[in-house]
Image: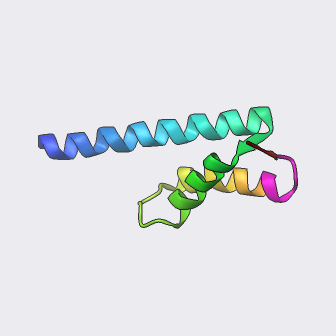
Amino acid sequence: MNEQQSGAETISTQSHLALKQMVERILSTGRLSRQEHLQLVNAFLSGYKLTEEERYLINQVFDERQMERLKFVS
């Protein structure tokens, strides 16, 4: 594995952890900021390669919001 591949994997791992932490916090507090919502929508719709787990995490937030279990906050 060369340094460039290792760097890309580190960024991917950091992004995955940040996404997971964001989703856990959103689901535990029941609050979703409009900025977080935009970040999740952008990640979901972008060309960024999401793992199956990342798509699942984002869908959890979208599902909870659709069922009105999450409140938008400023």
Furthest residue toward right: 68
**Image colouring:** rainbow
Q: Quadrant of the C terminus?
A: top right
State left or right for residue 63 relative to residue 69: left
Residue 65 rendering spot, x and y as whole percentages: 79, 54
In front here: 28 or 73? 73
Residue 38 rendering spot, x and y as whole percentages: 60, 55
Residue 42 rendering spot, x and y as whole percentages: 53, 60
Give the residue drawn at x 74%, y 39%.
Answer: 27
- Relative vertical location of residue 43 with respect to residue 72 in this rendering, above or below: below
Give the residue drawn at x 71%, y 51%.
Answer: 60
Asked if the stretch drawn in magenta spans residue 37, the answer is no
Residue 70 rendering spot, x and y as whole percentages: 82, 46
Q: Quadrant of the N terminus?
A: top left
In front here: 73 or 10? 73
| Region in magenta | 64-70
The number of callouts visible is 0
In the rendered image, which quarter is residue 63 located in? bottom right
State left or right for residue 51 relative to residue 69: left
- Relative vertical location of residue 7 with respect to residue 42 in this rendering, above or below: above
Asked if the stretch drawn in magenta spans residue 67, the answer is yes
Give the residue drawn at x 50%, y 37%.
Answer: 18
Furthest residue toward left: 2
- Relative vertical location of residue 14 with respect to residue 56 in this rendering, above or below: above
State left or right for residue 17 relative to residue 59: left
In front here: 45 or 17? 45
